[in-house]
Amino acid sequence: MEINAPSSGKSSVVLDQAPCAFCHSSKQSEGTGSFVAYAQGKEVTGNADNFPKVIHVHIKCLAWTPRIYFEDDLIQNLESEILRANKLKCSSCGKKGAGLGCCVKTCQKTYHVPCAYDIPDCRWDDGFLILCPNHAHHKFPSEQNVQSEKKDTHKRIPKHLNLSSPLLNLGKDLVFCGSGLSAGDKFALVNFASSSGALVFKNWRDNVTHVIAGTDSNGACTRTLYVLMAILHGRWILTMEWVKACVEAGHIVKEEPYEVVLDNHGSRGGPKAGRLRVQNKAPKLFNNLNFYFIGKYEQAYKADLVNLVTTGGGTITETKDLLLSSRTNDADTKVNVKQVTLVVYNADFTYNSEFEDESSIEASRLEAAEDVAQEIGCRVVPHIWILESIACGLLVYNLL
């Protein structure tokens, strides 16, 4: 999900789309993939109405359901797997159609694929297996094989080598999260982690040590929530070239030469600035700043903004009444308050009314924010200011 495009990666309903035979949803999201249709064992192209008994499924629901495979371009076991799945309730949402189970044989957890995708503690394997949160500490079969290979290798190591060398502890204490990676790079990252003993998480977690980011021809990464959270936490944000260098060298190489410098909005230096801020135990980026969000935001997008602000040391005032009362209390007690309040308006005009142009909407939102700011005695910023400040590692406007 790109943080400055709140509509990106969100679920969307496809009009007139038949629901998925597994998860029973007509929505499409990153966790479902696109829809495909099958009739008589073959994929339907063109108008599905021309075929009898068409089965509509999300491509990821299909791919991650066990026992389904292809033989001579014909899909096998699709209908029997649908029948099996529809007898099982999802351990997340409670609805039937949960064809994906935890790979620990004694575990009774089953999920819709998109429901499991939204659970941060599920672990995923390239062999189309998952481990539920209760068994995330278990090893996948592929990891068990890797461990066996490691033991065999250890026996063949010459005695003169230092057994504490990075080669034997390649991924110890490393936790990766990918951001904006291609399918090939995701596969390479998972393989690197599996072979080195490191962990990979699909979503951001506070114990992530390295975000591995896809970059364009200019070396710029996409400004995602994961990248911004990594900056605030002082974590490494590296290109895939670091992973390749580690594999070629046979040990962990120094990260700094591979640190991302630029994002796709032109902001520079944020990753290094974030690392140094944490390393030097400096105050957090939004320390002594209080934020009041005015106007309408997509709920999930606003939640991400609030998460970024609080992670960066800022505070949130939920309502105008609370904002007024806090200012009154400060005045009555004559406290020398160093905290600065910022009124934040939504500067995303993606969902414009067809009867209003962008400039009139911007003027209206800015005017509403300035009215509140004048009443309270504080300052106004667009929500983009939060993102730009994090991406640069400093407060980009001279407000303080």
Image: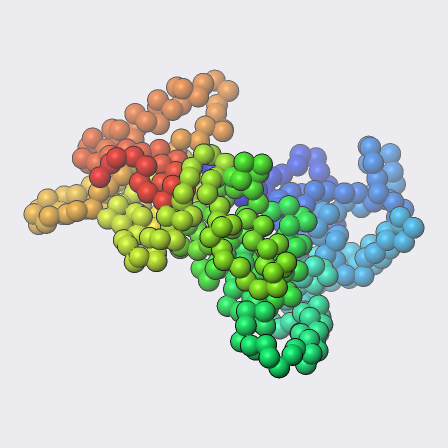
Residue at (54, 36) in percent of width and height? 218
Residue at (68, 49) in percent of width and height? 184
- Residue 393 or residue 298, whichever sits in front: 393
What percent of the width, then of the height, locates residue 320?
26, 40
Q: Residue furthest right?
A: 72
Which quarter of the figure is the C terminus placed in?
Answer: top left
- Residue 138 or residue 86, whichever sits in front: 138
Q: Quadrant of residue 109?
A: bottom right
Residue 203 visible in the picture: no
In the image, taking residue 204 as reference, residue 306 lies left or right, namely left
- Residue 228 or residue 380, whichever sits in front: 228
Q: Residue furthest front?
A: 160
Q: How is the image coloured?
A: rainbow
Give the answer, above or below, for where 20 lies relative to 133. above
What percent of the width, then of the height, locates residue 113?
66, 55
In the image, taking residue 145 as reference, residue 396 lies left or right, namely left
Residue at (59, 55) in percent of width and height? 245
What percent of the width, then of the height, locates residue 317?
28, 46
In the image, taking residue 363 as reference, residue 88 lies left or right, namely right
Which quarter of the figure is the N terminus placed in?
Answer: top right
Q: Quadrant of residue 268?
A: top left
What percent of the width, then of the height, locates residue 53?
85, 44
Residue 33 visible in the picture: yes
